[in-house]
Each structure stands twice: as C-alpha cells, then as structure tokens.
Image (cartoon, rainbow, N blue to C red):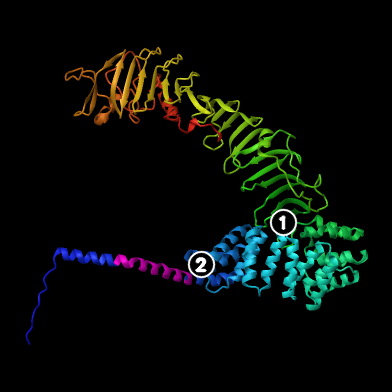
C-alpha cells in the first residue's frame, strides 16, 4: 500500500484573525440566549432548594416553634428572594407577632405580585392580605381586592365575608346590609355571615330581627356555640336566654361574655357560679366586660367582695376590641390592680398612636405619634399639667410650670378600684410652636438618652444662652450667648478642662472672629477673623496690637506680615505660593528672592559664594538638611513657622504652611502649639455655622 502524506499549508495571520473574529461574533450573538437560559435555570433550581427549607419551616410553624420556622424561611429566601411560597410562609410567621404586621403585609403584597406559586392556591394568601388591609384601615385597596375575589371566586363564602367586613369598616351600613342578605341567601348555613348580619341589625336598633335571624341559624345548625352565645345576648325572653347560656357553657364555650349574660339574667342569689366562670375564663382581660360584671356583682356584698378582691390583685393585659374583629384597639397593662400602661392602636398593626405610662395610679408620660411617624413624649408634673415635651429632632423642652396641659382621661383621676381609666375619644396635644413658646429650657441628649450634649435657656421660644459638648460626651466645652434669637458671643475650651481660652464673636448667625489666650495670661494673643478671607494674627507682647498676621488669597497665595519692632506696624511682607517664597517686602522696599533650582533652594537677597552667603529657605528638596538650623524658628514636624521678630529680620524665611508662629516665652512653646492645633484651620469650616442645629 502506498502512503501519501498531505501537508496542509499554514494559514496566514490575516486568515487566523478573520476566523477568530467570526467565532467571537458568533458567540456574541448566542450570548443573550445563553444568559437567558442561565437566568431561568438557576431560578428554578433556587426555588427547588428553597422548598427543602420551607417544608420543615411549615412543620415548625404548625408546632408553634416560631424561632425555628423564621430561621428556616430566612434560609429559603436567601436562595430565592422573590419566591412567592417562601414569602407566604414568612408572612405567616410575622403575623404571630403584632409588631411585624406591616412587614407581613409587605411580604404578602410581594408574593402576590411575583405570582411564583408552585404548590399553594394563591386564593388563601390573597384572602389573608385582603383581611389585613381591612384590619389596618387600608380600605381602598381592601375594597378592590374584595371585589376581585368575589368576582373571580364566587363559590367561596369567605370572599363575601371580606367584602362585608370592608363595608362595615368603611361605614357603608346600607350597602353592607344588602350584601349580607344576598350572601346569606347564597350560603344560609354560614355562621359568620349570619352573625355579621345579626350584629348589624342589633346595632341599627332592630334587635327582634337580629334574634329571629339567630334562631333560624340554630334550627339549621343546632348547638352551634357562637350562635348560642349570640342568641343568649339578643333574646328578650330571660328563661330562653339563661337556657342558651347554660347550654353554651356546658358544651365548652369559653367566651366570658356568656358568664356575664348569665349573671345579668338570673336573680342575685344565683350569680355566684357565673361570676366564678367569668373569672376562671379570664374575663378580667376584657375591658368591655369588666364593668358589666362589676355592676352585676354589686347586689351582693359577698359577690362584690369576691369581684373586688380578684380585680385588685389582677396583673396582666386588659383589651378593648372596639370593632369586634378579634384585634384590640386599646390595651391597658396592670400590676396588682394598678394600671401601669395604656396603648391605643387604631390600625391594629403593632404601631401605637398613643401610649401612656402610669406610676402609683397617676399619668406620668404620654407618647403621641404624628402622621409622619415621629413620636413626641409629653411628661407630666401634676396631671394634666406638663413638665416637659420631647419633640422629634429638637430635644426636650421644659415647660414653664402650669403653662401647658394635655388631658387624655375622661375622668379627673384614675379609678382606685382596679378598673381601667376611661380614655377620651380624641386627644389634642399642644402644637410644637406652643411648646416652644411656653418653655424656659431645651435639652438634647446623646443616643443613649442619658448623656446631655446641649442645653439652652429660652424665652418665648428664642434661645438666650446655650452650652454644649461638641464631642457629644457630656463635657461642656462651648458656651454661647444670644441676642434677638441669634448667636452674639461665646467662649470655648480647647483642652475641654473647664478653662475657656477662646472668645467668639458671631454676626448674622455665623462665627465672625475668635480670640485665644494661648498661655493663660488672661490676655488674648492669637486671633482669627472669618470673612470672605480668613485672617489669623498674633500679638506676641500682648499689648493689644497684632505683631504678625497671615491670610490666604483667592489665587492660592499665602501672605504673611510681620511687625519686627512689635509695635503693630507691619514692615515685612512675605508672599508664598505652592510652598515657595515668591516675594518679600521690607520697609516698603522689595527684597530679592532668587530661586536656585539646581540646589533646590530659594535665596533671599543676592546669591553669594563666599562666607556670609544667605542661608536657604526652609523649603524645596533640601528642606531636610535645613531642619536642624530652622528648629529654633518652628516645628520641623509641621514646617518652619514665620520667624519671631526679635531685633530685625534674618536672612532666611519660611515657605511652609505652619500652624502659627511660636509665642515669645520659651517656657510656653509646647502648650501654645498644643492649643493652636485644636483651633479650626482655614476659613471657619463647620465652626462657622450656628450651634445646636440652628
């Protein structure tokens, strides 16, 4: 056999480039489709992985282990954040805590919007969300949801119940009654619809119709506990009423309302067993029943003493469910028969509108939430007179005694018999402006609520004096006096040691100038003025006349002027730019300034080569070599300071941006620099604004 070897010619570089380009373009065209597939596949896989956490989460939820259920559903949401199944389980966990009701609503909304259900009929979470919207007063959204549910799933009576509940909450009485009658015709054996119509009729004063409606229900569903209880409360026949109560209790009814109806329906001598039932069923936790039970026990000294002993020892919560939806609107907390707290939540969502604290039976605080979510705390001196008001973002205002009041109790004093104080339907707190006008002091505290960081005396709402801790640690280091509500003058402690070395002058709400006593002599020797251009000046001999001053120009130049005779007459002017001296004027005559680039120095005066040549300035590439020689004129760490005038100008001058020239006293140099480093640099910075947020 003959073997042939075929040699393929090597492709040229141009051909290789063309092939690579073609492959690149082809891959680019396929990339969007590939990425789309990748996006979908991980989403499905992530949901499958999340399901592995959701099954045990639901089991833990059913077993009452909310902590484990919450942890498992959190893991599921990490894998699939928009998975409707996981969001649904999370909302059910959150609904077990009233404080997270709003979170539950948000997650249910998200679950319904994502619509990524795999095993759950979305009807149930949709109904749960609609019920929450009704409960929390979001009635427009609730009506749209209820109408949609009724239209899409008319076979489910729960949708008609939700629609009627929305109408009831919205006050649409006529529409509600028509809807309930139509719904009850569709679902005659639905107890909830029947009871809702009976309650509405009774509220409208049509109790006979309501009782008849309940009797019909008992014929359809004999011995139904809720219907028995409703019948006992509505029927005018006392004998029938007692029979309904006894049947209700004998069949395991646990609503203490049944015991109260029994007490009200029998002679005084037969009420003991009903009172015992009321107490054993937790009747003291029901604000709507306590008064009725107390009245029913008054006819007997024994019963009254029994009731009073129980209520005087009561510790726990007492709730009022004003709209009968199963969630309280008002809640009182008691300890040994004394009220310690009251909360009102109209939205029933864990966010209070009012919350009052009591001590020894008298109101001490009242918290009021504004529409924007801010909470103001009103503290009482002697109820209803206010002692102080903590306004959000403003601090605590201390009220002139007996100037402002905020009553919220319907009675002048808190009852001493263990019953809850009656609360006014509407509260009218004084306006923030009224609080400011009626106060004599305002205080601000750190985040810990204890550390005082700012205190101001006020008159008619305007500050007259302020002291503050600028570091926020409670150490007062700044004091300020006001005129016509604007800062006028102040003092500041640089070392925060109680010694106030800095005197301030303010104009137009801004810091205008500062004077500093750096050596503790009692006379200022350093000044800063803040205007369009900030000027710093030094008075070395403390004779009240500046001996040196410094300012920065708009073009970046820095000007330093010196009084070599310490008489306040500036006879030397040095201008630097970019760290180098550009000009010197002495006694009105310019002094030559010659840059020496090869040597990296600047010569002041004519350059010389022999003995007595001018020394280089403390700048440029040879600054390090001159630090030792410049040390007697300034700190090597911060650059040479302008020279201290002492009998004439020397042959070298600084080009640095030193903090300040040293003061003449040899023994005061360290403390001088320590203090000056604490002063604001530049044109005022944050220090120029008004203190205390004004």
State whether the magenta stretch is mostly helix, strand or loop. helix
- Which quadrant of the structure image shows residue 366? top right
Task: Classify residue 94 by image quadrant.
Answer: bottom right
Any mark on residue 256, and which?
Answer: none
Q: Position of residue 159 (x, y in %)?
A: 66, 69
Categorize mark 1 by other alpha carbons within 10 Å: few (<14), some (14-19), many (20+).
Answer: many
**Contact check, label 2 and label 1, Cβ < 8 Å:** no
Q: From which residue to which does the magenta span run?
A: 27-48
- Residue 494 lies, in percent from the top left, at 49, 29
Q: Quadrant of the C terminus?
A: top right
Residue 228 vs residue 204, the one in the foreground: 204
- Regarding residue 249, the answer to whether it shows in the image is no
Residue toward you, 17 or 453: 17
Q: Residues within 10 Å of mark 2 (few under 14, many from 20)?
A: many
Above or below: residue 363 compared with residue 590: below
Q: Earlier in the sequence, mark 2 or mark 1?
A: 2
Q: Residue at x 64, y 61 (%)?
A: 133
Circle 2 sits on which residue?
Answer: 83
Query: Residue 231 location, x and y as percent?
Result: 83, 70
Q: Tell me, for residue 329, which label it has, or none.
A: 1
Which residue is at 68% across, 46% downward? 367
């Amino acid at each position: 056999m003959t073997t042939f070897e075929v040699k393929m010619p090597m492709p040229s570089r141009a051909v290789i480039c063309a092939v690579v380009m073609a492959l690149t373009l082809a891959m680019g065209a396929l990339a969007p489709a590939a990425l789309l597939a990748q996006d979908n596949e991980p989403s499905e896989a992530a949901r499958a992985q999340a399901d592995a956490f959701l099954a045990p989460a639901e089991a833990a939820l059913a077993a009452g282990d909310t902590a484990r259920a919450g942890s498992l559903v959190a893991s599921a949401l990490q894998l699939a954040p928009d998975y409707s199944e996981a969001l649904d389980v999370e909302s059910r966990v959150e609904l077990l805590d009233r404080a997270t009701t709003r979170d539950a609503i948000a997650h249910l909304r998200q679950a319904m919007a994502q619509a990524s259900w795999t095993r759950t009929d979305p009807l149930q979470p949709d109904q749960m969300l609609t019920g929450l919207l009704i409960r929390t007063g979001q009635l427009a959204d609730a009506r749209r949801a209820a109408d949609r549910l009724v239209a899409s799933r008319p076979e489910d009576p729960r949708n008609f119940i939700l629609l009627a509940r929305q109408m009831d909450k919205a006050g649409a009485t006529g529409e509600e009654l028509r809807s309930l009658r139509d719904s009850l015709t569709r679902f005659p054996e639905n107890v909830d619809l029947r009871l809702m119509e009976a309650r509405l009729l009774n509220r409208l004063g049509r109790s006979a119709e309501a009782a008849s409606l309940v009797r019909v229900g008992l014929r359809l569903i004999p011995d139904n506990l809720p219907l028995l209880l409703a019948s006992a409360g509505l029927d005018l026949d006392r004998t029938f009423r007692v029979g309904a109560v006894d049947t209700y209790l004998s069949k395991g009814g646990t609503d203490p309302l049944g015991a109260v109806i029994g007490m009200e329906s029998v002679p005084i001598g037969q009420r003991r067993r009903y009172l015992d039932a009321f107490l054993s069923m937790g009747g003291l936790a029901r604000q709507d029943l306590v008064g009725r039970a107390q009245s029913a026990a008054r006819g007997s000294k024994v019963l009254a003493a029994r009731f009073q002993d129980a209520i005087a020892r009561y510790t726990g919560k007492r709730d009022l469910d004003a709209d009968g939806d199963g969630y309280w609107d008002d809640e009182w907390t008691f300890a040994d028969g004394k009220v310690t707290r009251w909360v009102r939540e109209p939205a029933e969502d864990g966010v209070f509108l009012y919350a009052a604290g009591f001590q020894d039976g008298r109101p001490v605080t009242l918290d009021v939430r504004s529409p924007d979510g801010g909470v103001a705390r009103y503290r009482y001196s002697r109820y209803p007179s206010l002692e102080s008001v903590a306004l959000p973002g403003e601090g605590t205002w201390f009220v002139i005694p007996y100037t402002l009041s905020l009553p919220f109790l319907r009675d002048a004093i808190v009852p001493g018999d263990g019953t809850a104080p009656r609360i006014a339907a509407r509260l009218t707190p004084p306006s923030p402006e009224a609080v400011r006008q009626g106060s004599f002091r305002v205080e601000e505290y750190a985040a810990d609520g204890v550390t005082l960081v700012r205190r101001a005396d006020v008159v008619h709402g305007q500050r007259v004096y302020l002291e503050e801790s600028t570091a926020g640690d409670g150490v007062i280091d700044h004091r300020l006096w006001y005129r016509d509500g604007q800062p006028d003058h102040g003092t500041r402690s640089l070392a925060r040691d109680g010694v106030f070395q800095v005197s301030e002058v303010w104009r137009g709400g801004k810091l205008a100038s500062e004077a500093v006593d750096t050596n503790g002599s009692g006379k200022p020797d350093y000044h800063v003025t803040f205007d369009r251009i900030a000027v710093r000046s030094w008075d070395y001999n403390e004779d009240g006349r500046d001996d040196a001053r410094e300012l920065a120009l708009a073009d970046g130049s820095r000007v330093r002027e010196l009084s070599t005779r310490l008489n306040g007459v500036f006879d030397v002017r040095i201008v630097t730019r970019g760290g180098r001296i550009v000009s010197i004027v002495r006694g009105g005559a310019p002094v030559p300034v010659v840059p020496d680039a090869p040597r990296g120095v600047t010569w002041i005066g004519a350059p010389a080569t022999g003995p007595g040549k001018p020394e280089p300035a403390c700048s440029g590439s040879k600054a390090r070599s001159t630090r030792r020689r410049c040390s007697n004129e300034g700190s090597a760490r911060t650059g040479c300071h302008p020279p201290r005038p002492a009998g004439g100008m020397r042959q070298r001058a600084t080009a640095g941006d030193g903090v300040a020239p040293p003061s003449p006293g040899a023994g005061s140099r360290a403390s001088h620099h320590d203090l000056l480093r604490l002063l604001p640099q530049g044109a005022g910075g944050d220090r120029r604004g008004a203190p205390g947020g004004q």
